Image: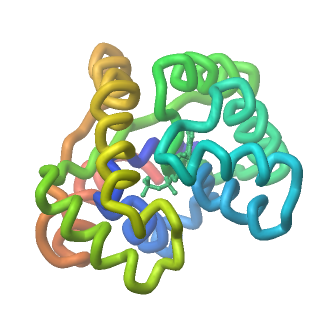
Amino acid sequence: MLNIVLFGPPGAGKGTQSELLIAKYNFKHLSTGDIFRANIKNETELGKLAKSYMDHGKLVPDEVTIQMLEAEVNKANSTVGYIFDGFPRTKAQAHALDAFLATKNTSITLMLALEVQEPELRTRLAERAKTSGRPDDAEPSVIQKRIDVYNNETMPVKAYYQTQNKYIGVDGIGTVDAVFNRLIEPLSKLEV
Ligand code: ADP
C-alpha cells in the first residue's frame, strides 16, 4: 500500500493534482475539505458545525476532523492506498493519523508538498472565487485568515514528516502537467 499526504497552502493545487494522481494510481482520495462541503450541502449536523468554522477560515476542531477521517478510511477500505488531501492540518492530526494507520498495519509513505508563495496563492484563490461558489474564497479577509492558519497551525506538520524523512517539496508553479510530472517523479522510484 502507498499512502500519500498531499500538502500545501490553500490554493496550491492539491485538489487538481489529487485528481491526476488518482487517475494514474487508483488511490482513494480523501479530502477533508470536500467531505465537510458534502456534509454542508446535505445539511448534516457535522456540516452545520464545520460551516461555522470554515466560513471564517478557521480549522474545524481536531477531535471532530480526526473522527470523521477515520470513519471515511474505514468506509473506503482501499487496498491500493490513500491520498490525504487537506489532512493532517495540525500536529495533533498527524499523530492521530500515524496511530490510526498503525492499527491497520500500514503507514504514510510520503508527504508531497506543493510549494507556492503567498502572492500567487492570493491571486489563485481570488480567481477560483469566480467559479467555486465557496464562501471562504469570496472574502479577502477569510483568505488571509486561511493563509495565517496555514502558517501557524499547519506548517509544523511539515517538520513532523521531515523528521521521519518522508517530506518531499515540489515547486507548485507552472502548468498543471509540469507540476504533476514533478509530483510523480518520487513516486516512480517506489513500487506501486
Ligand atoms: P483549502 O486548502 O483551499 O483551504 P480545503 O477544502 O482543504 O481548502 O479546506 C477548506 C476548509 O475546511 C478549511 O479552511 C477548514 O476550515 C476546513 N478543513 C479542511 N480540512 C481540515 C482539517 N484537516 N482540519 C480542520 N479543518 C479542516
Left or right for 65, reference 137: right
Assign the N terminus to one quadrant of the image: top right
* Residue 111, above or below 133: above
Q: Is residue 187 visible?
A: no
Q: Position of residue 51 (x, y in %)?
A: 67, 52
Q: Which residue is painted at 52% across and 24% down in the image?
A: 94
- Res 119 → quadrant: bottom left
Q: Position of residue 93 (x, y in %)?
A: 57, 25
Left or right for 77, reference 57: right
Q: Which of these two is toward me, 128 or 105?
A: 128
- Res 68 → quadrant: top right
Q: Which residue is painted at 65% across and 17% down in the image?
A: 99
Left or right for 111, reference 85: left
Q: Is residue 33 visible?
A: yes
Q: Which residue is painted at 55% across and 17% down in the image?
A: 92
Q: Which residue is painted at 39% across and 76% down in the image?
A: 129
Q: Position of residue 67 (x, y in %)?
A: 77, 32
Q: Which of these two is toward me, 92 or 130?
A: 130
Q: Position of residue 154 (x, y in %)?
A: 38, 31
